[in-house]
Image: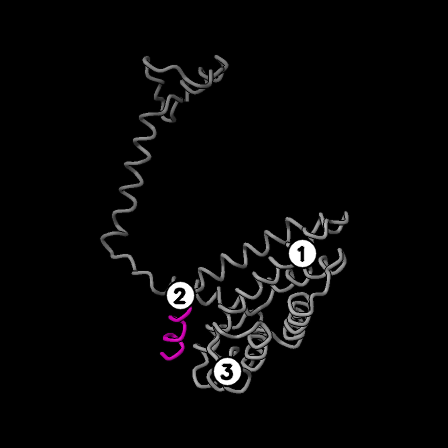
Amino acid sequence: MAQHDNLLVLAANMGDLRTLREELLLFVVRWQPEVGNSTARPTLQYGIAQKCYTLIDRILAVCTAEAVTLTGRSGEEACRICCDGKPPLRMTLGERVQVLEKLDRELARVLPQIAGKRSLGKAGIGLLHSISKSRNQFIHDGVDMDEHQVAESLRQAAEFCKLNLLSMMLYSCTSLKKRRQPPRTLEAVTKLPMQSTRWNKALQQRSNQPRSGGFVVSQRREPLVRWEIAPSRVAASLVS
């Protein structure tokens, strides 16, 4: 029951998470080939890196807020240890990474398992720290991004979208919606075949094609296809 109540929390922001991940994936698909095949203008390189890190930060904001809520006291403790009790919306990207790392094992308990893996694991945590480091160098240290660094940021963004954490949260929301759908009543189920039969009959009446059972096309409608049948086949069908 407690896990079901926790899953209800996901319904509010999972639409944003799905939209943000799709936007980031489309962004990577749009710019990765161009950056890899040619040298982009410096202003374009800056814009690509900025948009990439902005979308990642927004996705992490949603994930961190949901993770803290789902894990209850463990989430509050992680916030206190990693960022002095700061709420997720006021955290930096690096602080969100630390909180998610702290809650990785706890999230495996409250979120459904996918292929038996944890939400982040060692590889996922390493990826988040690498993204945080690159983003800090770009935003705070003013490091100029060349084409190789921009290509690396897009590669990291593509790997970020594949993280088990995002799939687990989205899968939880989908499963919750299916469980909350009202079951069909017996009356509604028994009416389905009749509705289907009436619908098919209406389609047949509007059709201008020959039907099985010996019916011919109405004289007022011309068939879309001219049917050529050999006389021998017609004679054989009449004899049978």
Residue 9 image offset from top left, x and y in percent: 39, 71
Q: Secondary structure at mark 1?
A: helix
**Residue at (60, 52) in percent of width and height:** 27
**Residue at (58, 75) in percent of width and height:** 97
Residue 214 image offset from top left, x and y in percent: 36, 22
Instruction: Specify the quadrant of the image occupied by residue 96.
Output: bottom right
Is residue 193 on the magenta stretch? no
Q: Are marks 1 and 2 in contact (CB under 8 Å)?
A: no
- Say which label, 3 or 2, has the lower sequence index: 2
In the picture as drawn, the residue positioned furthest to the left comes out as: 187
- Say which label, 1 or 2, has the lower sequence index: 2
Please give the residue where the numbered disc 1 appears in the rendered image: 46
Q: Residue 11's mark?
A: 2
Residue 224 image offset from top left, x and y in percent: 44, 19
Q: Secondary structure at mark 3?
A: helix
Q: Is residue 214 left or right of residue 124?
A: left
Q: Is residue 134 left or right of residue 118?
A: right
Magenta stretch, main secondary structure, is: helix
Please give the residue where the numbered disc 3 appears in the rendered image: 79
Is residue 7 on the magenta stretch? yes
Q: Secondary structure at mark 2?
A: helix
- Which is in the foreground here, disc 1 or disc 2? 1
**Type of residue at label 3?**
Cys
Query: Magenta segment, which residues?
Result: 1-11
**Type of residue at label 1?**
Tyr
Residue 75 image offset from top left, x and y in percent: 48, 82
